[in-house]
Image: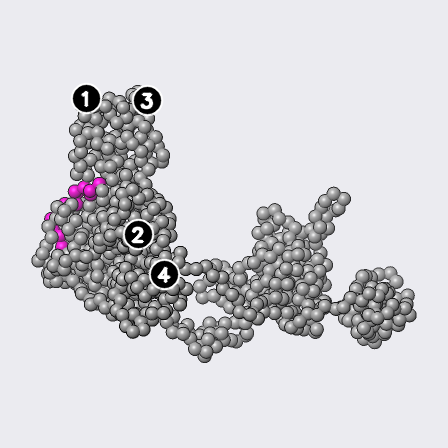
Amino acid sequence: MRVPLSWLREFVDVPADAAPEDVLAALVSVGFEEEDVHRFDLQGPIVVGEVLEFVEEPQSNGKTIRWCQVRVAPDGATAADGGPAVHGVVCGARNFFVGDKVVVTLPGAVLPGPFPIAARKTYGHVSDGMIASARELGLGDEHSGILRLVELGIDAPVGTDAIALLGLDDIAVDINVTPDRGYALSIRGVAREYSHATGAAFRDPGLRVWGELQQPTEGFPVAVQDEAPIRGRVGASEFAVRVVRDVDPTKPTPAWMISRLALAGIRSLGVLIDITNYVMVELGQPIHGYDLDKLQGGITVRRAAAGEKLETLDGKVRTLHAEDLLITDESGPIGLAGVMGGGTTEMGPETRNVLIEAATFDTVSIARTARRHKLPSEASRRFERGVDPLIPFVAARRVADLMVEYAGGTLDTAVGGALFTTVVQDAITLPKPFTSGLIGVDYAPDEIVSALEKIGCRVDDASDAWQVTPPSWRPDLTDKWTLAEEVARIEGYDRIPSVLPLPPSGRGLTLAQQGRRRVANALAAAGFVETPSFGFTTEDQNDLHGSPSGEHLPSVKLANPLDGQAPFLRRTLIPGLLQVAHRNLSRGLTDLALYESGSVFLPEPGVQYGTASVPPLAVRPDAATLAALDASIPPQHRHLAILVTGNAVAKQPGQAPVAADLVDALDAVRTVAAAAGVAIDVAQGRRAALHPGRTGVLSVAGTEVGYVGEVLPAVAEASDLPGRVFVAELDLDLVLSLAGEKVVAASLSTFPAATQDVSLVLSADVPAAAVRAALVEGSGELLESARLVDDYRGQGVPEGSKSLTFALRFRAPDRTLTAAEATEAKLAGVAAASERFAATLRE
């Protein structure tokens, strides 16, 4: 909201020497956000000049210029720039005449841009200044010719300071108005808030004697026929109509009004429209003016019918929705209520009689219409936040008075129309101890009452509570909490102490949260980078990566997806990591070690999700409603995914690059297992998107928890990944649940270890993980670790067989093992492997 200070001073006593920053500081103290300070950015000398004569001179480029003699100071006086009273000026415009008074920017002046003015040679003359247009002065977008003061109704003496004359020395402060404080989208509202902040005297422009506002209610029919109100609220509750006759739309808008509207961010569109915009900014009540002679019959406010169309003031023909609230006459729709008027009844140069409309519309109706048609306007911005229901009649009369004064019209006291609604503000019970208890400040009762009365509330005292009736312009005050917030705002936020809350004893991260944090920290410490991705994907990606064999599994489809090409919630994290890898590779980052921890959505076949009805906002849902909502949500598991591609070791002096391999993904899985406190087993497996023979199934204590492997070259190529890509994905929730509640570190033995290797020959179909498990089980408690170090298939090994070599390490907690004891334990493990898989010791 831009607030010109000269306008603000009309309604509140702002000190003459107050800087814009002082005004902003005062408004910030009562809860507004500071945005900016707006000026016309002009620097004099800029004066009123009179065109004495000019000579039109055609140029070789086809343009005709005027060599003008302009008086810029009275006879015998020195001009404001220290030069002679008459200056020679080159001008390209041709819309002025001898004797016209114009605005002349003399050498030394600066126009917005910045554009400094200096005497310069052009078209064979030395132009000693410039005759300015409205756009060059910052008064509007009009640039068809220079600004003639007669068009503004101004006849000032030559040499007068044009900056002050046109109000170009005014300044506007810009504040951010939150949606709940729509009353501040007006000079009236901001002036009241400045008064709250500083104690300055406030003069309410909305207070007028009712006798001045009384108007005829007959002669022009007004009706509301809302047969389908939204949420039971009729679309229009008040509708005031005034008629002004014999206006002259060609009369100039006063210069001070143009400058104020320009600073407020509104361009001048002619005196009639300017007056309606001026009153809207001043009082916060949107106003619409109709060409009365173009109206057919009376006005009816109703909902749109299916298929109706309306051409709005912006020239677009809009197909209307059944919820749209319309202004209509006997010809049909003539405006979108509270949003934008129609072109058929627009005021224009030929308008002679004006119908003024000031109404109160339903906030929800206006907000939905503006968003539906992508048509935000200054009017809808105010209506959707709530307009003071007591101000329409004041605003309508204010517009009529200004049209009589500046457009030469006559107020018709015999014809009018009105729809009245009794405005009732319900009282709110505010317990006396409540405000201090909520805010944390020991407010005296008098302070609370004074703060509420200052914002316009009526406060009635009772024994243990106040009955507070909010003012009509504050629809946001609905309960005791909002009243308490107002007391804190008016009394000053600086009184609220800064106290850090103390956490309840015994609380902290849950075991699952601690586990997820350990895993994330471990991967980060191992050199992996966390890259969160969007949770949306395609159904094909879900089928390819989210199931072992690529079969179709149910996925959750969004009703209103952000991306129509990816409308499904993910069943797996891998597609997101592949997209992140592609994005990084396209930017030259080729060596990647990535991970992501996030939710996947795994609906059960045949179950319909999202069918529970959403409870109303004003009602606290009961346990049954919450249970129904939970049941309507698909199961969400937290998964962890890893991706490795490029080089695991970069090229460096004395070190050739080492390409990433499946072992790097396996090492990352082991890092996760160690952080989670589990032992993860790897067995041969298959996945639709992974390379056969290079895919492993991950399990903990016999429970499958995920997979690891190399992405198929075709799948990697489809993701625009040129090299080998290795991935792993685990159900992190399941892994942490299998870890138990506590992770107990094993004791470290001080006795030396005994190491022995064993090579076993067995069928090539037997997984190495199963052989290792047999060795571990058979070797007993003395075996500390068993690690596969070689898988040989070739000469010396029978066809269809393989030789697996394991490095075994034995250790006893209470003694130094002998070689015989270690050998005995090893042979026990070999016996177990031989019994299960017919394994034999390799010769």
Q: Quadrant location of residue 111?
A: top left
Question: Could you say which disc has been placed on residue 488 in the image?
Answer: 4
In this rendered view, identify the residue nearer to me: 133 or 336: 133
Query: Which amino acid does the dot numbered 4 rest on?
Result: Ala
Ranked by sequence position, the earlier of labels 1 and 4 is 1
Q: Is residue 43 above or below residue 622?
A: above
User: Which mark sits nearer the N-terminus, 1 or 2?
Assistant: 1
Residue bearing the label numbered 1? 76
Element at label 3: strand
Residue at left 26%, top 27%?
80
The type of colouring in the image is one colour
What residue sits 65% from the left and 69% below the top? Answer: 735
Is 706 on the left-hand or right-hand side of 470? right
Q: CA distance from mark 1 to mark 2?
A: 49 Å
Neighbour tally class for label 3: few under 14, some 14-19, many 20 plus, Cα within 10 Å: few
The answer to whether marks 1 and 2 mark residues whose Cβ atoms lie closer than 8 Å is no
Q: Residue 121: which disc?
A: 3
For this view, does 624 lie left or right of residue 160?
Answer: right
State the CA–CA distance, disc 4 to disc 3: 64 Å
Q: Which residue is mark 2?
A: 198
SS at mark 4? helix
Q: CA distance from mark 1 to mark 3?
A: 26 Å
Instruction: Name the front one of labels 1 and 3.
Output: 1
Q: Nearer the viewer, mark 4 or mark 3?
A: 4
Query: Which residue type carries mark 3?
Result: Lys
* Disc ID at residue 295: none
Residue 277: x and y, percent? Answer: 24, 50
Q: Is 162 drawn above or below residue 59 in the view shown? A: below
466 or 307, nearer to the observer = 466
